[in-house]
Image (cartoon, rainbow, N blue to C red):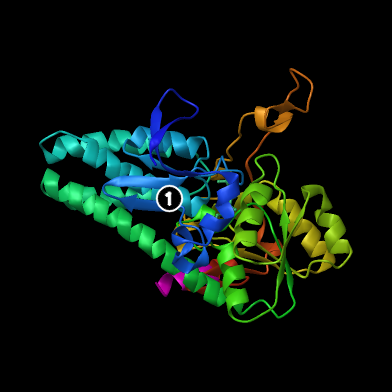
Amino acid sequence: MIFHYQYNTSQKIQIHFKYSADSIVSLLTKENTAIHSSLKTIEWKDNKLIMIDQTKLPNELIFVEFTDYNQVANAIKTMVVRGAPAIGVSGAFGLALAALQSSVTTKEELIRELEIAKKILFETRPTAVNLKWGLEAIMKVANTGTTVTEIKESVVQTAKKMAEDDVQINMAMGKHGSELFNDNDTIMTHCNAGALATVAYGTALGVIRATKDSGKNIKVIATETRPVQQGSRLTAFELKHDGIDVSLIPDTAVGYTMAKGLVNKIIVGADRVLRTGHVFNKIGTYQIALIAKQHGIPFYVASPLSTFDMKSNPEDVVIEHRNGSEVTGIGDKKTAPEGINVINPAFDMTTPELISGIITEKGVARAPYEESIKKLFEAN
Ligand code: MRU
């Protein structure tokens, strides 16, 4: 079933498949979830990019087809696709589409067009470092090609390889991370660092999946994650779909659940990790880490090496501020007075002394982070 679907801009985008809320649960057990028992968020088929429209979850599961890099840029900006690794890979596929769209005949012209596309894709979201990483990796490959045909072929192949690697890396991270969790743990997570934030399997939720698959009985507490509600819309949806015991709490109940002993470990993802172990992640992560410290609850971060920024200092990192309308309403319903001032940062920074360990595909970094992170990179 293919039809047109209009979102946010005047661009018409092809929907590959659309399923109603009623059919989602049965659908999820079929072909789309065959890979590692979790959703496939990003896929490349017949020179087209297919992604789940995450703005429609959990009510509708819609796979949207992209053939134009401008549409991909718009999808990243409007959070049709979101989560650091997912925007890194979709940015790379965006550049692959830009190459395929091009009708130029020389390498120099193609590189010029790709640089323009890279800038447009890069300016969509500033905090997650994976976007820069994905775009730069594609440009590097493009620059080494000699002919237009060769470059087109190699950028597509590189983006496809990145998508495949993402799943393998998440599974390796899951394996390392699962050793930190015990039978009967109740694990809190924030935002969505799952299959939907990656190509498949997830980072923090990948660790949770691997822990469960290792035979341990675990429960999860997911925060709602206002204002965009990635926790309730995406994490709760994903875990429920995989049959993992999950309870949803309002963000304001984080202190209550820890004080009552309802949580004994925490795991979150990351949008950027600095060489010093400073972690940038979804707004609210910092206060969760602070309360965890107060209650002596281990606080872990799961993050692939592609999310590390070994050059920047904390003050260099740009925190994205999003539209106030995310805070003044829920869906179409207004929940704040007209004209109110809003501060709506999308991310915050958690300092290294609050973090018990950073789980990567190469192992777990522990304090002092500068030393242990360096070692993980050297093991690469
Ligand atoms: O604004 P979002 O939804 O893109 O933010 C996502 C997060 O903060 C995730 O925790 C992070 O990207 C890690 S995803 C594996």
- Please give the name of the residue rendered at 65% of the width and 38% of the height, measured from the top-left corner: 345
Is residue 213 positioned above or below 374 on the image?
A: below
Query: Looking at the rendering, in which quadrant would you find the C terminus?
Result: bottom left
The response on whether ligand 1 sits within 8 Å of label 1 is: no
Give the image location of residue 41, x and y in percent: 46, 53
Q: Is residue 61 magenta?
A: no
What range of the chain is rendered magenta?
Answer: 372-380
Crowding at dot 1, Cα within 10 Å, few <14 / some 14-19 / many 20+, comes out as many
Relative to the observer, which residue lies in front, 263 or 374? 263
One can see residue 57 in this view? no
Which residue corresponds to mark 1?
88
Relative placement, left or right, of 113 versus 224 is: left
Query: Looking at the rendering, in which quadrant would you find the N terminus?
Result: top left
Give the image location of residue 106, x and y in percent: 11, 37
User: What kind of residue is marked 1?
Assistant: Gly
- Please give the name of the residue rendered at 43% of the width and 64% of the height, measured from the top-left corner: 167
- Please give the name of the residue rendered at 73% of the width and 58% of the height, measured from the top-left corner: 289
Element type at marker 1?
helix
Relative to the observer, which residue lies in front, 298 or 371? 298
Image quadrant in which you'd find residue 177: bottom right
Image quadrant in which you'd find residue 241: bottom right
Relative to the observer, which residue lies in front, 357 or 232? 232
Give the image location of residue 80, x and y in percent: 50, 40
